[in-house]
Image (tube, helix red, strand yellow):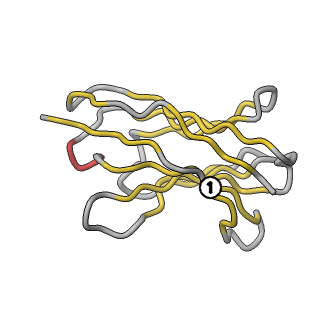
Amino acid sequence: QVQLAESGGALVQAGDSLRLSCAASGRTLGNYAMGWFRQAPGKEREFVARIIWFNGVTSYADSAEDRFIISRDNSMNTVNLQMNSLKPEDTAVYYCAAGSRRSLEYTYWGQGTQVTVFS
Protein backbone atom coordinates (compact mmCIF):
# COMPACT_ATOMS: atom_id res chain seq x y z
CA GLN A 1 0.00 0.00 0.00
CA VAL A 2 1.10 3.51 -0.79
CA GLN A 3 -0.48 6.44 1.01
CA LEU A 4 -0.43 9.79 -0.74
CA ALA A 5 -1.18 13.21 0.70
CA GLU A 6 -1.28 16.34 -1.43
CA SER A 7 -0.75 19.86 -0.17
CA GLY A 8 -0.19 23.34 -1.52
CA GLY A 9 -3.47 24.12 -3.21
CA ALA A 10 -4.61 27.74 -2.97
CA LEU A 11 -6.55 30.62 -4.46
CA VAL A 12 -4.20 32.57 -6.73
CA GLN A 13 -4.32 35.19 -9.42
CA ALA A 14 -3.67 34.48 -13.09
CA GLY A 15 0.04 34.69 -13.81
CA ASP A 16 1.03 33.57 -10.32
CA SER A 17 3.01 30.47 -9.45
CA LEU A 18 2.12 27.68 -7.08
CA ARG A 19 3.92 24.57 -5.86
CA LEU A 20 2.02 21.41 -5.02
CA SER A 21 3.56 18.62 -2.99
CA CYS A 22 2.65 14.97 -2.62
CA ALA A 23 4.00 13.10 0.38
CA ALA A 24 4.21 9.35 -0.11
CA SER A 25 4.43 6.71 2.60
CA GLY A 26 4.05 2.98 2.97
CA ARG A 27 6.49 1.74 0.36
CA THR A 28 9.65 2.76 -1.36
CA LEU A 29 8.87 4.29 -4.70
CA GLY A 30 11.65 2.88 -6.84
CA ASN A 31 9.30 0.83 -9.02
CA TYR A 32 6.63 3.47 -9.36
CA ALA A 33 5.55 6.13 -11.74
CA MET A 34 4.23 9.18 -9.91
CA GLY A 35 1.67 11.30 -11.63
CA TRP A 36 -0.31 14.47 -11.19
CA PHE A 37 -3.83 14.62 -12.51
CA ARG A 38 -6.55 17.24 -12.26
CA GLN A 39 -10.29 17.43 -12.46
CA ALA A 40 -12.17 20.62 -13.17
CA PRO A 41 -15.88 21.02 -12.34
CA GLY A 42 -18.02 19.17 -14.85
CA LYS A 43 -15.02 17.64 -16.60
CA GLU A 44 -13.26 14.31 -16.54
CA ARG A 45 -10.02 13.83 -14.69
CA GLU A 46 -7.04 14.48 -16.94
CA PHE A 47 -3.35 13.74 -16.90
CA VAL A 48 -1.02 16.64 -16.09
CA ALA A 49 2.49 15.28 -15.57
CA ARG A 50 4.41 12.14 -14.68
CA ILE A 51 7.82 11.23 -13.31
CA ILE A 52 9.37 7.79 -13.20
CA TRP A 53 10.86 7.58 -9.74
CA PHE A 54 14.01 5.54 -10.36
CA ASN A 55 15.34 7.46 -13.36
CA GLY A 56 13.56 10.82 -13.16
CA VAL A 57 12.16 10.70 -16.68
CA THR A 58 9.25 13.11 -17.00
CA SER A 59 6.27 13.53 -19.28
CA TYR A 60 3.72 16.34 -19.57
CA ALA A 61 0.32 17.03 -21.01
CA ASP A 62 0.33 19.68 -23.72
CA SER A 63 -1.47 22.06 -21.35
CA ALA A 64 1.36 21.75 -18.81
CA GLU A 65 4.35 21.73 -21.13
CA ASP A 66 6.63 24.75 -20.65
CA ARG A 67 4.70 25.98 -17.58
CA PHE A 68 4.74 23.11 -15.09
CA ILE A 69 7.67 21.17 -13.71
CA ILE A 70 7.36 17.85 -11.93
CA SER A 71 10.18 16.74 -9.64
CA ARG A 72 10.92 14.28 -6.88
CA ASP A 73 12.72 14.54 -3.59
CA ASN A 74 14.22 11.20 -2.68
CA SER A 75 15.09 12.20 0.86
CA MET A 76 11.58 13.41 1.64
CA ASN A 77 9.73 10.83 -0.49
CA THR A 78 7.75 13.59 -2.10
CA VAL A 79 6.74 14.55 -5.61
CA ASN A 80 6.32 18.21 -6.42
CA LEU A 81 4.53 20.08 -9.15
CA GLN A 82 5.77 23.60 -9.77
CA MET A 83 3.11 25.49 -11.67
CA ASN A 84 4.02 28.80 -13.30
CA SER A 85 2.05 31.33 -15.32
CA LEU A 86 -1.20 29.95 -14.00
CA LYS A 87 -4.37 30.50 -15.99
CA PRO A 88 -8.03 30.39 -14.93
CA GLU A 89 -8.39 27.19 -16.93
CA ASP A 90 -5.90 25.54 -14.57
CA THR A 91 -8.57 25.70 -11.87
CA ALA A 92 -9.21 22.15 -10.68
CA VAL A 93 -8.72 19.65 -7.93
CA TYR A 94 -5.21 18.26 -8.36
CA TYR A 95 -4.53 14.64 -7.49
CA CYS A 96 -1.31 12.77 -6.92
CA ALA A 97 -1.15 9.13 -8.01
CA ALA A 98 1.28 6.22 -7.90
CA GLY A 99 1.35 3.28 -10.25
CA SER A 100 3.36 0.82 -12.25
CA ARG A 101 6.22 2.42 -14.14
CA ARG A 102 5.80 -0.22 -16.82
CA SER A 103 2.06 -0.20 -17.45
CA LEU A 104 1.49 3.37 -16.19
CA GLU A 105 -1.68 2.17 -14.53
CA TYR A 106 -2.23 4.20 -11.39
CA THR A 107 -3.29 2.23 -8.35
CA TYR A 108 -2.96 4.66 -5.48
CA TRP A 109 -4.51 8.10 -5.30
CA GLY A 110 -4.45 10.99 -2.88
CA GLN A 111 -7.47 12.96 -1.73
CA GLY A 112 -6.69 15.97 -3.89
CA THR A 113 -5.93 19.63 -3.32
CA GLN A 114 -7.93 22.54 -4.74
CA VAL A 115 -6.27 25.07 -7.03
CA THR A 116 -8.34 28.08 -8.02
CA VAL A 117 -6.99 30.69 -10.42
CA PHE A 118 -8.90 33.95 -10.85
CA SER A 119 -8.35 36.58 -13.51
Give the image location of residue 62, x and y in percent. Answer: 39, 57
For image coordinates 76% across by 47% down, the residue present is 53
For image coordinates 35% across by 54% down, the residue present is 63
Q: Residue furthest left?
A: 119
Vertical placement of residue 28 versus 38, above or below: above
Left or right of residue 112, residue 53 in this image: right
Work out which quarter of the rendered image holds the C terminus and state it: top left
For image coordinates 30% across by 57% down, the residue present is 40
Work out which quarter of the rendered image holds the N terminus and state it: bottom right
Give the image location of residue 47, x and y in percent. Answer: 48, 61
Label 1: which secondary element: strand
Q: Nearer the viewer, residue 5 or 72?
A: 5
Can you tell which quarter of the image residue 32 is in? Answer: bottom right
Q: Residues within 10 Å of mark 1 (few under 14, many from 20)?
A: many
Tag 1: amino acid? Ala
| Figure disc tally | 1
Give the image location of residue 24, x and y in percent. Answer: 72, 41
Q: Nearer the viewer, residue 3 or 47?
A: 3
Left or right of residue 9, residue 1 in this image: right
Give the image location of residue 83, x and y in percent. Answer: 41, 35
For image coordinates 56% across by 40% down, the residue present is 6
Vertical placement of residue 63 versus 11, above or below: below
Vertical placement of residue 67 versus 93, above or below: above
Can you tell which quarter of the image residue 113 is in? Answer: top left
Q: Which residue is mark 1?
A: 97
